[in-house]
Image: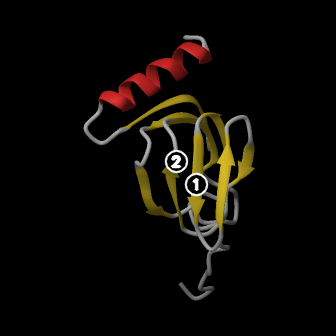
Amino acid sequence: MAALSDTISLAIDKALKAPNGRHAEILVHDGPLRQTVIALKKGVQLAEHNSPPAASIQVIRGVLQVTGQETVVIQEGCVEALTHDRHSVEALENSVFLLTTVTSIPGRNSHTGQIPVVDPEA
C-alpha cells in the first residue's frame, strides 16, 4: 500500500499529462464503501451526474466548485457532504480530492437516494 501523499502526487501528475485532464484511483473498496483519489487539471469538469446515497468530498489540493441545485466552492483542506441531487464538479485550480461514497443503503436506490416503489402485485 502506497502512502496517501505519494498517491496524491502521482494522481495530479497523471491528470496533468492525461488528454482528458483527470485521473482517479480507488484506495478503499469495502462492500458499499469506496474512497477514491481524484485529480483534475484546472478547468476540467466532471459532467453532471447522479449522486450516490451518501458521499463527501475532501479537497486535499486546490479548489473545487460543485454545481447542483446550489453552487458550492470547496477550498483546500475542507470537507463537504455532497448533494443528493445531480451535480457537476469543476476544478478551479489543479486539484486533488478524496471522494468517499456509500454506493448502497438498504431500502434506497443506488445513486438516487430515493426509496424504491414496490408494486405489491408484481
Where disc 1 sits, the SS reads strand
Where disc 2 sits, the SS reads loop
Q: Amino acid at mark 2?
A: Leu
In the rendered image, residue 114, in percent from the top left (x then y), is placed at 65, 72
Task: Identify the residue under disc 1.
Answer: 65
In the rendered image, residue 25, in percent from the top left (x then y), is placed at 47, 30
Q: Amino acid at mark 1?
A: Gln
Identify the residue shown where x is 63% and y is 46%: 101
Identify the residue shown where x is 69% and y is 65%: 107
Q: Residue furthest bottom?
A: 121
Comparing 33 with 118, the one in front is 33
Check disc 2: other Cα within 10 Å, few if <14, some if 14-19, many if 20+: some
Task: Identify the residue under disc 2.
Answer: 92
Q: Cβ–Cβ below 8 Å for labels 2 and 1?
A: yes
Is 10 located above or below residue 101 in the figure?
Answer: above
* Picture quadrant where residue 28 is located: top right
In the rendered image, residue 56, in percent from the top left (x then y), is placed at 68, 47
> Can you say which quadrant of the picture contains the N terminus?
top right
Q: How is the image coloured?
A: secondary structure
